[in-house]
Image: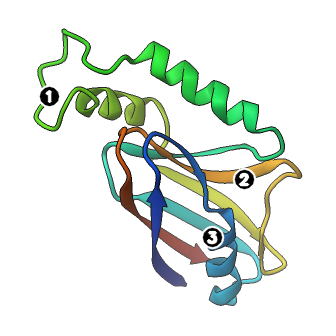
Amino acid sequence: MHQEILTVSTPGRGLVDFTADIRRVVRDSGVATGIAHVFVLHTSASLTVQENADPDVLFDLNGWFTRTVEDGDRHFRHTEEGPDDMSAHVRASLTDTSLSLPVRDGSLLLGTWQAVYLFEHRTRPYERRVVVTVQG
């Protein structure tokens, strides 16, 4: 078993591809066949596997979340950190905080057009911590 904590810098709301970092952790683990478990240590960011070929997919996905869960919704009581506070928590609850990804032949096994993204739900930049545990 091998575990590392990664830091993923975000520019603010949107999706950040950090697949290369996970691939490195898997490679460094020495595990030939197993699972890479990825877990974000925050409540206002999440993880997703999405297409990496057409940036419009990420644009549209982010846009859908922005329209569906609006910042500053008057029904939200939790607003201590600003109008994007509770909406970020709702967005994170609608997506994943962890992913289990296959490892085969010592490499992360993803489909041709798949990448792993940290989905930042806050509007300002953050340094997010993500735990990657590789078991085989």
User: Pointer 1: residues within 10 angstroms few (<14), some, or many (20+)?
Assistant: some
The answer to whether residue 136 of the structure is visible from this angle is: no
Q: Quadrant of residue 29?
A: bottom right
In the drawing, what numbered circle is on residue 115? 2
At x 74%, y 38%, the residue is 55
Q: Quadrant of residue 134?
A: bottom right
Give the residue type at disc 1.
Answer: Thr
Q: How many marks?
A: 3
Residue 89 in the figure: left or right of residue 31: left
**Element at label 2:** strand
Residue 47 percent across, percent down from the top left: 52, 48
Residue 111 percent across, percent down from the top left: 84, 52
Where is 114 relative to 80, above or below? below
Give the residue type at disc 3.
Answer: Ile
The answer to whether residue 41 of the structure is visible from this angle is: yes
Residue 115 in the figure: left or right of residue 47: right
In the drawing, what numbered circle is on residue 79? 1
Labels 3 and 2: the sequence-earlier one: 3
